[in-house]
C-alpha cells in the first residue's frame, strides 16, 4: 500500500525534475528511485499521477518538506502551473 | 558518500556481441577526457572499428547508443540520447539524436553507452535491469509496430512504469533506407536509417530500467548553475512560446521567409488559404490534452494531442515539430490539419522516418504531375497532391517494401536513379539523404544543411535565427558568435562563420546529452559554450574552458570528415545544394526573385573551408589542421587513401 498522497492531474508535464531535485536534497545525488515524490504516466500520457510519500516506501524516502529551506525544492523547480497542486499534497505531509 | 572513479558519467560502456550473446564492459574514462561523451565518443570508436569495406547492413557494422555526461542530472535539457552507426543512405557518418527517458535510465543503470556488435541469428531484444543484462527472444515481437512492441515488452517484464525502450517497427525489419528507431512511443532517432541497421542485426528493441544514481563532483556549484540557468529560461520569450505551443510555431516565420517546401519545393510558401486553415495555435488549443516535458527540461515543448473529431477522431499521440508541418502540409500539400499527427504517429508506429516518407512520396507526386510516372508505375494509385488516403497507403507500402513502395523505400535519391527519365532533378536530397530544408532562402541554414557530415539535416551546423520566432539580438549575437550577423536570411555576411560556430556547438550538445532547443540555438540568451563548460566542469570535476570544448568539437568534426572521406567519395562536389535550389529563383513570397547561384555558393564554400583549414578545391583537411588537433592517426589514414592535402 502506498503510504503517501496521490493526485492525478493534466498539469504535470512529466519531466521528473522534482524527482531528481528531491533525491538530490536527501542524498546529494540524482536518483529518482529514492525520491519522496513519484511521477507516473496515466491514461496513455494524457494525465500524470503525482505521489508524495509520507513514510519510506520501498526505495522511496519519506518527505521532510525540505526542512530548513524556505520553499520545498519540488515546488521551486516546478513550473507555476503545478504550485497549487504540489502545495495541496504537501499540506498533508507532517512537518 | 563513497568516492567514485568518475563523476557525471555512469562510468561503464556495455558491449554486446549479438553473434555469441556475450556481454562485456569497459570504462568510459578511456575515451571521456578526449571525446567528452555521447556521439563524440561514439564517432571516434566507429572511425577506428569500421574498416573501409564495411557496409551498413553487414554484421561488421556497429551501433552505439549513448547518453552523455550531463544526462541524469538537472542540467537544463539533459535528456538526449544518440544512436551512431554507418549511414544507410550515404554510407558515411550516421548519427541520430532524440529526447528520451531511456538515456537517463541507462545512466541510472550504470552505463554511458551500449555498443552493439555482430548479428543475432534470430530476433532478440536486450533487457538491461540495473547491472543485470539479458538477451531475450523477440520472435513474438517481430512484425509488431513500435507501439505494440513497447506495450508487449512492458507487460512481459512486469513493469509498465519505469521501463523505457528503443525499438524498431516493420520499417526497420524490412531495411527501409531511413527506418527510424523509436524512443518509447513519441520520439525518434529518425535520420541515417539506423533502425534498418538494427533490423539487419535482428535486434528488435532494447529495454532499460535503472534505480541507481548519477553523482556530480561539485554538487553545490552544479545546482547553483542549474537554478541560475533555469531563471534565464523563465525570462526567455522564445522559451515561453515553445512551452505554450511548441516548435511548430516556427510556421509563421518560415512562411514569412519562404522556408516551406510546398509541393516538393515547387513553391516555398503555403497558399494563403492553406496557411490560414492550418492555424497551429488554434490546433493546440483545440486538441492538446497535456504538455509533455523530458527529464530536466525547463522548456516542456512537447504535448499529447487527443484528436476528437474529423477523419482521425480517437487518435491520441505525442505531438510533432515544425518538420512534420513542412513535410506533410508543405511538401505533400495536405489541407487536413489533423493529418499531421495522424501520419506522424503512423510513421512512428511503422518505424519509418518522416523525411524519407515525405521525400520519396513528394518526389513521386511531382513526377506523376509531370507525367514522368504513370499509374502503371504506381500500382494503379493516382498520386494527386494532398490525397491523404494515397499517402497513407504509400507509407504502408514503404514500410513493407510492397510494389511501388519497394522503390520509394530507397529514398528519393536512389528511387530517382532507378526510375531515371529526368526524375533525378525533382529528388530533393543531400548526399543521398532525403532533405526537407529549403536551402535557397536562408544562407546559413542552407550551408549548415549542405555541409553536414551525415548528409543533410539542420542540426550539425545550421543556425535557426534566420527564420526565428523572435528578432535576433544582434549585439549579443556578435558577442556569442564573434562575427556580425543579422537575421536577414539571404545576406551572406557572417554566415560561414556562424556555421563554423554551430557545427562545433551542436556536436558539444550531442556529446553532453543536451537538447539544442535549450541553448543559444533557439534563443541567443540561453546557455552557450561558457555555460555548458561550467556545467561540465562542475559535473565532472575536470575544469574545462570554452576554448577546450571548441578544440575537442573541432576534433570531432574532423573525425567525421575523415570517416566520410575513407568510406565514400563525398567531397566538395557534394556540398552543393540540389540543382533545383541553384537553378530556380524563389518563385513567390517576401523573397521572390532571389536567385542562389552556383557562383555565390562557391564563394561561401571557399570561405567555410578556409575557416576549417580544409583544401578549397577538394574539401580535404590539411595536414596542418589535423596535426594541430593531435589527429596524427588520421593524417596517416587519409594519406594512405590520397585524401590529405599537404599544407
Image (cartoon, rainbow, N blue to C red):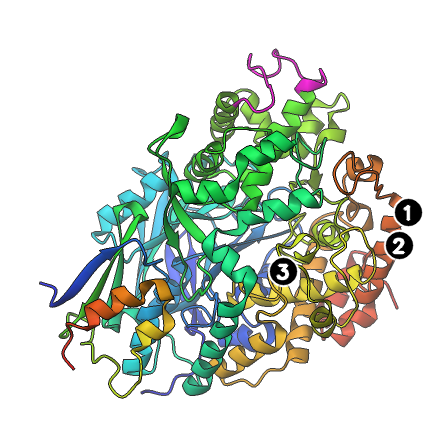
Quadrant occupied by the N terminus of chain B: bottom left
| Chain letter of the residue carrying label 2 | B
For label 1, the residue is B599
**Measured from the top left, where is residue B163 in percent x and y?**
30, 56
Question: Up-down: is B68 above or below B442?
Answer: below
Q: CA distance from mark 1 to mark 2?
A: 7 Å
**Measured from the top left, where is residue A59 in percent x and y?**
20, 71
Q: Residues within 10 Å of mark 2 (few under 14, many from 20)?
A: few
Quadrant occupied by the C terminus of chain B: bottom right
**Which of disc 1 and disc 3 is earlier in sequence?**
3
Residue B603: mark in rendering? 2
Q: Are marks 1 and 2 in contact (CB under 8 Å)?
A: yes
Which of pointers 3 and 1 indicates the residue nearer the eye?
Answer: 1
**Measured from the top left, where is residue B390 in percent x and y?**
52, 21
Instruction: Reply yes or no: does residue B126 show up in magenta.
Output: no
Secondary structure mostly seen in magenta is: loop
| Chain letter of the residue carrying label 1 | B
Give left or right: position of B102 versus B358. left
Q: CA distance from mark 3 to mark 1?
A: 34 Å
Residue B215: mark in rendering? none
| Chain letter of the residue carrying label 3 | B
Q: CA distance from mark 2 to mark 3?
A: 31 Å
- State the residue in front, B134 or B628: B628
Residue B47: mark in rendering? 3
**Residue B42 visible in the current orientation:** yes
Q: Residue at x 69, y 72 (%)?
A: B476
**Measured from the top left, where is residue B34 in percent x and y?**
60, 75
SS assignment at label 1: helix
Please give the range of residues in magenta: B368-387
Give left or right: position of B207 versus B532. left
Amino acid at each position: 500500500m502506498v503510504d503517501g498522497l496521490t493526485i492525478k492531474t493534466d498539469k504535470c508535464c512529466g519531466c521528473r525534475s522534482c524527482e531528481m531535485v528531491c533525491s538530490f536534497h536527501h542524498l546529494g545525488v540524482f536518483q529518482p528511485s529514492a525520491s519522496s515524490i513519484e511521477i507516473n504516466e496515466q491514461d496513455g500520457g494524457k494525465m500524470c499521477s503525482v505521489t508524495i510519500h509520507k513514510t519510506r516506501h520501498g526505495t522511496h524516502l519519506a518527505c521532510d518538506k525540505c526542512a530548513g529551506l524556505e520553499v520545498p525544492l519540488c515546488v521551486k523547480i516546478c513550473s507555476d502551473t503545478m504550485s497549487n497542486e504540489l502545495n495541496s499534497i504537501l499540506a498533508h505531509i507532517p512537518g | 558518500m563513497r568516492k567514485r572513479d568518475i563523476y557525471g558519467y555512469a562510468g561503464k560502456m556495455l558491449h554486446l556481441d549479438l553473434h555469441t550473446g556475450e556481454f562485456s564492459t569497459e570504462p568510459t574514462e578511456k575515451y571521456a577526457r578526449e571525446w567528452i561523451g555521447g556521439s563524440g565518443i561514439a564517432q571516434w570508436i566507429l572511425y577506428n572499428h569500421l574498416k573501409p569495406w564495411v557496409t551498413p547492413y553487414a554484421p561488421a557494422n556497429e551501433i552505439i547508443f549513448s547518453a552523455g555526461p550531463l544526462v541524469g542530472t538537472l542540467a537544463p535539457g539533459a535528456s538526449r540520447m544518440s544512436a551512431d552507426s554507418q549511414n544507410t543512405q550515404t554510407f558515411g557518418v550516421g548519427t541520430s539524436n532524440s529526447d528520451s527517458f531511456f538515456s537517463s535510465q541507462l545512466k541510472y543503470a550504470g552505463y554511458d553507452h551500449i555498443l552493439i556488435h555482430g548479428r543475432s541469428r534470430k530476433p532478440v531484444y536486450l533487457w538491461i535491469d540495473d547491472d543485470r543484462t539479458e538477451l531475450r527472444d523477440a520472435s513474438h515481437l517481430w512484425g509488431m509496430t513500435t507501439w505494440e512492441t513497447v506495450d508487449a515488452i512492458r507487460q512481459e517484464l512486469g513493469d509498465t512504469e519505469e521501463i523505457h525502450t528503443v525499438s524498431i517497427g516493420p520499417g526497420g525489419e524490412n531495411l527501409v533506407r531511413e527506418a527510424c528507431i523509436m524512443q518509447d512511443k513519441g520520439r525518434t532517432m529518425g535520420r541515417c536509417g539506423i533502425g534498418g541497421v538494427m533490423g539487419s542485426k535482428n535486434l528488435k528493441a532494447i529495454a532499460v530500467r535503472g534505480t541507481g544514481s548519477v553523482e556530480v563532483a561539485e554538487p553545490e556549484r552544479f545546482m547553483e548553475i542549474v537554478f541560475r540557468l533555469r531563471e534565464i529560461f523563465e525570462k526567455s520569450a522564445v522559451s515561453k512560446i515553445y512551452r505554450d505551443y511548441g516548435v511548430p510555431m516556427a510556421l509563421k516565420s518560415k512562411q514569412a521567409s519562404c522556408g516551406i517546401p510546398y509541393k516538393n519545393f515547387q513553391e516555398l510558401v503555403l497558399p494563403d488559404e492553406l496557411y490560414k486553415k492550418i492555424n497551429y495555435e488554434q490546433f493546440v488549443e483545440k486538441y492538446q490534452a497535456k504538455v509533455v516535458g523530458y527529464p530536466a527540461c525547463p522548456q516542456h515543448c512537447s504535448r499529447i494531442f487527443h484528436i476528437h473529431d474529423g477523419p482521425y477522431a480517437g487518435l491520441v499521440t505525442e505531438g510533432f515539430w515544425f518538420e512534420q508541418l513542412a513535410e506533410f502540409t508543405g511538401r505533400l500539400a495536405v489541407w487536413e490539419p489533423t493529418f499531421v499527427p495522424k501520419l506522424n504517429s503512423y510513421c512512428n508506429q511503422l518505424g519509418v522516418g518522416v523525411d524519407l516518407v515525405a521525400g520519396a512520396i513528394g518526389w513521386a507526386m511531382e513526377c506523376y504531375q509531370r507525367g514522368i510516372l504513370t499509374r502503371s508505375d504506381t500500382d494503379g494509385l493516382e498520386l494527386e497532391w494532398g490525397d491523404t488516403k494515397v499517402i497513407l497507403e504509400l507509407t504502408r507500402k514503404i514500410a513493407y517494401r510492397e510494389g511501388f513502395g519497394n522503390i520509394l523505400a530507397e529514398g528519393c535519391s536512389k528511387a530517382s536513379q532507378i526510375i531515371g527519365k529526368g526524375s533525378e532533378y525533382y529528388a530533393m536530397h543531400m548526399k543521398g539523404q532525403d532533405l526537407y530544408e529549403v536551402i535557397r532562402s536562408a544562407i546559413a541554414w542552407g550551408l549548415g544543411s549542405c555541409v553536414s557530415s551525415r548528409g543533410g539535416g539542420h542540426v550539425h551546423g545550421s543556425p535557426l535565427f534566420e527564420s526565428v520566432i523572435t528578432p535576433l539580438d544582434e549585439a549579443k549575437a556578435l558577442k556569442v558568435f564573434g562575427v556580425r550577423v543579422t537575421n536577414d536570411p539571404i545576406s551572406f555576411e557572417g554566415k560561414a562563420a556562424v556555421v563554423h560556430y554551430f557545427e562545433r556547438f551542436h556536436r558539444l550538445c550531442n556529446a553532453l546529452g543536451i537538447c539544442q532547443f535549450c541553448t543559444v540555438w533557439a534563443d541567443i540568451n540561453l546557455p552557450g559554450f561558457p555555460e555548458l563548460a561550467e556545467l561540465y566542469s562542475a559535473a565532472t570535476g575536470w575544469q574545462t574552458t570554452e576554448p577546450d570544448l571548441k578544440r575537442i568539437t573541432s576534433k570531432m568534426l574532423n573525425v567525421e570528415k575523415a570517416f566520410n572521406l575513407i568510406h565514400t567519395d563525398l567531397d566538395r562536389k557534394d556540398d552543393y545544394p540540389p540543382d533545383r535550389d541553384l537553378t530556380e529563383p524563389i518563385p513567390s513570397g517576401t523573397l521572390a526573385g532571389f536567385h542562389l547561384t552556383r557562383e555565390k555558393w562557391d564563394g561561401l564554400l571557399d570561405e567555410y573551408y578556409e575557416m576549417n583549414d580544409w583544401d578549397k578545391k577538394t574539401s580535404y583537411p590539411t595536414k596542418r589542421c589535423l596535426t594541430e588537433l593531435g589527429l596524427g592517426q588520421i593524417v596517416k589514414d587519409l594519406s594512405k587513401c590520397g585524401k590529405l592535402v599537404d599544407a
